[in-house]
Image: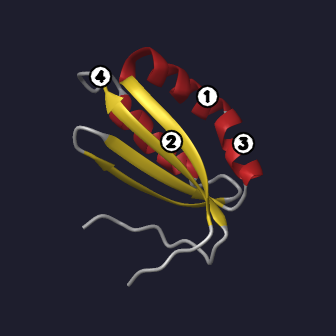
């Protein structure tokens, strides 16, 4: 069973990153682990969920849009983004959404 992020009461924001990977690891695994650890240290970070088969989907949760903007501008994250463009992803899409309601068991 995967971990479901323990998010606070809405509203908060979700960054949905959907991707197709290129062949081979090429350092991706190590960088992905580093990015998860680094994101967790950023102000406004609330949690992350990720799954991969043929299509990868990672959803990170943030308290506000400013926190998302600051994460995107983080120097180490920018380096990972550059490598993603150059060698890890054949295609990807980023979507930013405001979560207004959530529920579950």
Q: Position of residue 48 (x, y in %)?
A: 48, 57
Q: Position of residue 9 (x, y in %)?
A: 62, 78
Q: Which residue is mark 3?
A: 69
Which of discs 2 and 4 lies nearer the camera? The answer is 4
Mark 2 Cα shell of 10 Å, populated few (<14), some (14-19), many (≥20): some
Q: Which residue is mark 2?
A: 35
Instruction: Identify which residue, 28 or 90, lies in the foreground.
Output: 90
**As displayed, is residue 103 above or below residue 95?**
below
User: Which one is earlier in the sequence, the residue at label 2 or at label 4?
Assistant: 4
Q: Which quadrant would residue 4 be assigned to in this image?
A: bottom left
What residue lies at 41% left-to-right and 40% top-to-bottom?
18
How far is the residue under mark 1 from the one under mark 2?
10 Å
Residue 34 vs residue 43: left or right?
A: left
How far is the residue under mark 1 from the one under mark 4?
19 Å
Q: Which quadrant would residue 71 be assigned to in this image?
A: top right
Of helix, strand and loop, which one carries label 3?
helix
Q: Which residue is mark 4?
A: 22
Q: For the N terminus, which image quadrant? A: bottom left
User: Which one is earlier in the sequence, the residue at label 3 or at label 2?
Assistant: 2
Of helix, strand and loop, which one carries label 1?
helix
Which of discs 3 and 1 lies nearer the camera? The answer is 3
| Numbered badge on residue 78 | 1
Mark 1 Cα shell of 10 Å, populated few (<14), some (14-19), many (≥20): few
């Amino acid at each position: 069973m995967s971990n479901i992020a323990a998010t606070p009461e809405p509203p908060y924001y979700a960054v949905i990153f959907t991707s197709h990977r290129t062949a081979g690891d090429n350092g991706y695994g190590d960088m992905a682990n580093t990015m998860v650890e680094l994101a967790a240290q950023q102000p406004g970070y609330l949690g992350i969920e990720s799954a991969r088969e043929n299509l990868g989907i990672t959803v990170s949760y943030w308290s506000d849009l400013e926190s998302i903007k600051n994460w995107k501008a983080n120097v180490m994250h920018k380096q990972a983004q550059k490598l993603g463009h150059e060698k890890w992803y054949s295609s990807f899409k980023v979507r930013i959404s405001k979560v207004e309601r959530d529920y579950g068991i």
